[in-house]
Amino acid sequence: MAFRVEVSPRAFRDLDEIAGFIETHGSFQQAEEWFNGIMAAIRTLEMMPDRCRVADVSSELGQEVRMLLYGKRRLYRVYYSVQHRTRTTGTVRVFHVRHWARESLDARQLGTMIRDEIL
């Protein structure tokens, strides 16, 4: 059985903004390829979502948040959490996508994003 992957509205906005930036500074084709590629990477979380590293701020949150790294040089961080129903089933909630060059998220910012997606 596989995990169900849910991409939050916030994460879709992040993806759209990044794709828009790529299109503006490159081409529509590059943006489309990037978007399709990162969505394919996100879909891989259906199987073994616990394989990705735990974000450093997880301990401050008291909640496990993981990061999927995407790109040839792992330039994009996909932040998500896993709710297990059983060892092999549950839900993966993607709540934020961020380019590595942007300032890192602190526990407060990450906690706010998680709470906003639950409400």
Image: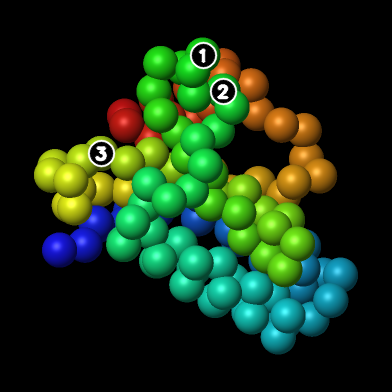
Using the rendered view, name the quadrant where residue 84 is placed.
top left
Q: Secondary structure at mark 3?
A: strand
Q: Does residue 81 appear in this view?
A: yes
Mark 1 burial class by Cα count in 10 Å: few <14, some 14-19, many 20+: few
Asked whether disc 2 touches disc 1, contact meaning CB atoms under 8 Å apart, the reply is yes
Give the CA distance from mark 2 to mark 1. 5 Å
> Quick check: 21 above or below 63?
below
| Amino acid type of the residue that numbered disc 3 sits on in the rendered structure | Gln
Name the residue at 54% across, 76% down.
36
Label at residue 83: 3
Which mark is on residue 90? none
- Asked which quadrant contains residue 44, the reply is bottom left
Q: Quadrant of residue 63?
A: top left
Q: Secondary structure beneath disc 2?
A: loop
User: Which residue type carries mark 1?
Assistant: Glu
Q: Position of residue 117 (x, y in %)?
A: 38, 35
Total of numbered circles in the picture? 3
| Left or right of residue 36, residue 89 in this image | left
Quadrant where the C terminus lies?
Answer: top left
Q: Position of residue 114 (x, y in %)?
A: 43, 30
